[in-house]
């Protein structure tokens, strides 16, 4: 995914100007999130817009908003949306989620591929590293925003490093967001999971479902499960 664009089955995503280019985490989130019945979807930290566009493809009647604070990313995401088959249903806004207005109402589904680093020092001169730094949007602030923006029966889906799960789930619960589903992501069989996909709802789920997916087979190709999950998007 090192070139300046990435082709999916129904749309192309240009990402050379974005602080968050197309990556496996975003694709996993866009494929895994349960968007059934969603009418209004919000993608927080949309970057080049890939998750927003995936949501628009999967939720055929949904209006999708993507927000980001990075000007070049917003401009590129807008161009990607306008060039897609979903142009009439995808809106990209430059906004900080902590100040994002509820003037348009709450959302049925909120998606986020958030910053990962926990250190307080941003790597100099790297917009992408800035976008990935958790000090730019701490988990507590993200969850405050989600709790405010999500409707009563809404769903919040997020992708995180595996080691962040326990703390994040605890902070979410403090805000009335309960874990409903999770998927641990293992790149290769010999290594432990590096990422986890989490789904939250406002109602408590007695036994949240938990699964695991392997991305690569022994020969380096996509595993059958990963190929099945992404079949509507990858060429």
Image (cartoon, grey):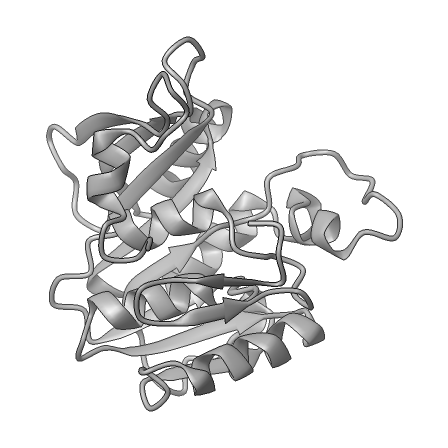
Relative horizontal placement of residue 130, taking residue 27 as reference (left or right): right
Foreground pick, 201 / 214: 214
Residue extending farthest right: 124
Q: State the image coordinates of residue 108 (x, y, percent, origin top left).
A: 24, 67
Q: State the image coordinates of residue 26 (x, y, percent, origin top left).
A: 44, 51
Residue extending farthest top: 190
Residue at image point 39% right, 68% down = 52
Residue at image point 13% right, 37% down = 205
Quarter holding residue 18: bottom right
In this orientation, does residue 149 appear?
Answer: no
Q: State the image coordinates of residue 137 (x, y, percent, origin top left).
A: 62, 52
Q: State the image coordinates of residue 69 (x, y, percent, origin top left).
A: 65, 70
The C terminus: image quadrant: bottom left
Foreground pick, 8 / 115: 8
Quarter holding residue 74: bottom right
Q: Is residue 163 above or below residue 55?
A: above
Residue at image point 52% right, 72% down = 67
Total numbered labels placed on residues in the image: 0
Q: Is residue 125 above or below residue 69?
A: above
In this orientation, does residue 131 appear?
Answer: yes
Residue extending farthest front: 219
Residue at image point 83% right, 40% down = 121
């Amino acid at each position: 995914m090192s070139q300046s664009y990435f082709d999916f089955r129904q749309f192309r995503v240009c990402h050379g100007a974005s602080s968050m280019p197309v990556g496996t985490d975003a694709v996993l989130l866009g494929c895994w999130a349960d968007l059934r019945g969603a009418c209004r979807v919000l993608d927080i930290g949309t970057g080049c817009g890939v998750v927003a566009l995936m949501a628009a493809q999967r939720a055929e009647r949904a209006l999708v908003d993507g927000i980001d604070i990075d000007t070049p990313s917003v401009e590129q995401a807008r161009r990607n949306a306008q060039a897609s088959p979903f142009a009439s249903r995808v809106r990209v806004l430059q906004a900080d989620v902590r100040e994002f207005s509820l003037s348009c109402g709450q959302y049925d589904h909120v998606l986020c591929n958030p910053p990962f680093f926990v250190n307080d020092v941003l790597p100099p001169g790297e917009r992408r590293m800035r976008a990935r730094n958790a000090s730019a949007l701490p988990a507590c602030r993200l969850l405050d925003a989600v709790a405010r923006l999500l409707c009563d029966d809404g769903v919040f889906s997020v992708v995180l490093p595996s080691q962040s799960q326990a703390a994040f789930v605890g902070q979410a619960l403090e805000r009335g967001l309960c874990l409903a589903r999770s998927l641990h992501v293992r790149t290769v069989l010999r290594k432990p999971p590096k990422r986890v996909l989490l789904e939250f709802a406002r109602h408590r789920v007695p036994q949240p479902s938990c699964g695991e997916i392997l991305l690569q087979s022994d020969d380096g190709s996509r595993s059958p499960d990963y190929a099945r999950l992404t079949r509507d998007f990858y060429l």
